[in-house]
């Protein structure tokens, strides 16, 4: 199950269901222009790359971004954009979208006031949670989802230990570690995360 989910690199994710959706396209190798929706979690360069968005987008693609990024759409030409606030709900291309606040509790990199988000996307009766750059927070610790894509690299986000604690509380069917091995963290972070997750939860290490 869930073979439709791919981690391309870092936090760059593709889900190929009834719609083709990307999250934070980054270091995209090929120009596919196949995206129905592209989700951006925040404006940092490893999550918001107009060049990489351009490689997957086409004139019919919807770009979903946090409200805090109004104005950034000008860098992407004439692409269609929709903005959502942390905690907000919207819909595009028949896909239900919940924006979950994404922030660090103590670190200065992603403070709550900046309005960054992760997303819960419901497609083909599957709930996918893409956390964005965040720690374990009151807003995400009780999320119910089928697939959870969680940052594990530490420094800018939670580390593998905290990420496993979050996943063990959420109890998704599948957990996938992200945000390590290139910009931050080591390639061992995914393995460490897998070792700490409850054995009843499937873990796929894709980086």
Image (cartoon, grey):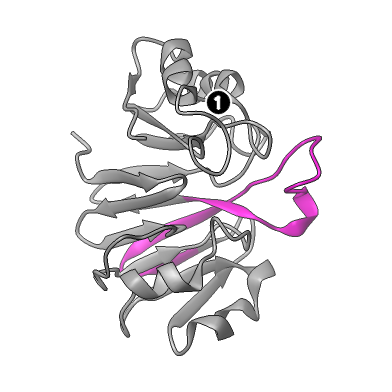
Residue 178 location (% of width, % of height): 46, 37
Q: Which residue is found at the position 69% from the left and 44% from the top?
A: 103
Locate residue 62: give its quadrant: bottom left
Left or right of 121, for residue 58: left
Mark 1 is surrounded, within 10 Å at the Cα level, by few (under 14), some (14 to 19) or many (20 or more) other residues, namely many
| Front one among 21 and 48 | 48
**Was residue 104 drawn as part of the magenta stretch in this picture?**
yes
Q: Give the vertical position of 180 relative to 87 (above or below).
A: above
| Front one among 204 and 167 | 204
* Tag count: 1
Q: Quadrant of the N terminus?
A: top left
Q: Which residue is found at the position 45% from the left and 90% from the top?
A: 78
Q: Can residue 145 be seen from the camera position used here?
A: no
| Front one among 88 and 203 | 203
**Was residue 107 drawn as part of the magenta stretch in this picture?**
yes
Residue 35 location (% of width, % of height): 29, 68
Provide the residue designation for mark 1.
Answer: 163
Left or right of 34, for residue 151: right
Q: Quadrant of the C terminus?
A: top left
Locate residue 85: give its quadrant: bottom right
Q: Give the vertical position of 14 relative to 79 (above or below).
A: above
Residue 49 location (% of width, % of height): 51, 67
Q: Which residue is found at the position 81% from the left and 44% from the top?
A: 108
Magenta span: 90-119
Q: Secondary structure at mark 1?
A: helix
Q: Can residue 17 be seen from the camera position used here?
A: yes
Left or right of 126, for residue 101: right
Residue 112 location (% of width, % of height): 76, 49
């Amino acid at each position: 199950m869930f073979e439709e989910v791919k981690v391309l690199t870092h936090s760059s994710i593709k889900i190929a269901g009834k719609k083709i959706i990307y999250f934070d396209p980054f270091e995209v190798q090929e120009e596919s222009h196949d995206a129905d929706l592209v989700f951006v979690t925040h404006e940092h360069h490893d999550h918001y790359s107009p060049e990489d968005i351009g490689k997957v987008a086409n004139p019919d693609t919807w770009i979903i971004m946090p409200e805090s990024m109004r104005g950034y759409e000008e860098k992407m030409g004439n692409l269609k954009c929709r903005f959502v606030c942390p905690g907000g709900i919207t819909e595009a291309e028949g896909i239900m979208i919940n924006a979950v606040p994404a922030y660090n509790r103590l670190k200065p990199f992603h403070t709550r006031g900046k309005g960054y988000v992760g997303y819960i996307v419901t497609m083909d009766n599957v709930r996918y949670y893409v956390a964005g750059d965040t720690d374990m927070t009151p807003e995400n610790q009780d999320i119910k989802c089928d697939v959870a894509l969680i940052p594990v690299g530490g420094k800018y986000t939670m580390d593998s230990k905290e990420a496993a604690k979050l996943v063990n509380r959420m109890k998704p069917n599948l957990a996938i570690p992200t945000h390590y091995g290139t910009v931050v963290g080591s390639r061992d972070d995914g393995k460490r995360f897998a070792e700490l997750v409850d054995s009843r939860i499937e873990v796929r290490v894709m980086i």
